[in-house]
Image: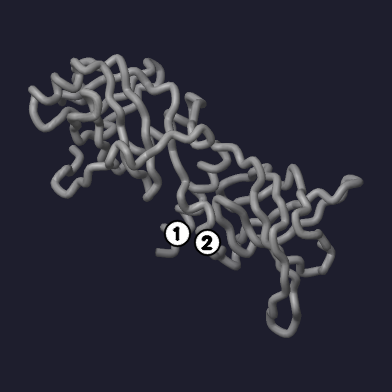
Amino acid sequence: MPNYQNAEQTDISAIEDHERFLLRSAGEIRNELISLGKKPDIITAYFNGGKEFILTAVLGVLAERQILVLDVGPDDATTQRAIAAGSLICTTRSQGVPVKFHCQGLRSAKFQGQAAIAAVMPDNLYRQQRREYFRVALPRIQSPLLDVPLGDGQNLQLKVLDLSIGGLSVCDNEDNFHPALLDEFRACRLSLPEFGELTVNIQIRNQGKYHRSNEVVSRYGAAFVGLSMSDNLHLQRYLYHLQSSTS
């Protein structure tokens, strides 16, 4: 059972809908809700035009039946008012990132022998990434690699020095990479150890040199261009994994 004793209410007005942060893939929505249920993260569920709310949590995701199971409110009367309202606006924060979704088709239910609220799985889910430019220094062993297509079937493999949702920086040990500022490279392969590979487009934003041992190495900073929401989430999970493993 979730612990609501020190739970904080997430203000409904603190999360604004932006199209580029909306997940619409059923699989992505399901995975995000399952992730919310693992801690579980405390959710503020508003109803009655935002005038009332309950603190709840994801108890289960029945994907084959398209059902989301939420915890009940503090008492039966409040829970029944929430169900009678017909829909909930659910807000929370997952790993510090704002999350919002709407629940409809509410009804009383039982889940693992306890009272619960059943709802139809939402058809979209808002997940904002506020820390797009917070870069994580990467381990020297098993560091991510970026394969950059140079044309004529040639690729250049570069070591990634740091990484964020917004972009990355790479080093060119052999001095084979000579881009100009704002040059774009499409269909680059970003290899994330233990997390697979992403295909990304990048734009060069800065360049410079740094000293390593007794040599001077070229360094380039780049921004991701048109990163999809699914790749954004995959990258977030990788960065969270790195931060968790080093904390």
Q: Is residue 151 left or right of residue 220?
A: right
State the residue position of label 2: 136
Q: Position of residue 50 (x, y in %)?
A: 24, 29
Q: Report the front residue among 40 and 43.
A: 43
The disc labelled 2 sits on which kind of residue? Val
Q: Report the front residue among 124 and 137.
A: 124
State the residue position of label 1: 243
Q: Report the front residue among 103 and 157.
A: 103
Contact check, label 1 and label 2, Cβ < 8 Å: yes
Residue 188 position (above or below residue 122)? below
- Which is nearer the N-term, disc 1 or disc 2? 2
The disc labelled 1 sits on which kind of residue? Gln
Q: Secondary structure at mark 1?
A: helix
Distance between the alpha carbons at the discs numbered 1 and 2: 8 Å
Residue 6 seen in the current view: yes
- Count of numbered labels shown in the rendering: 2
Q: Is residue 196 left or right of residue 35?
A: right
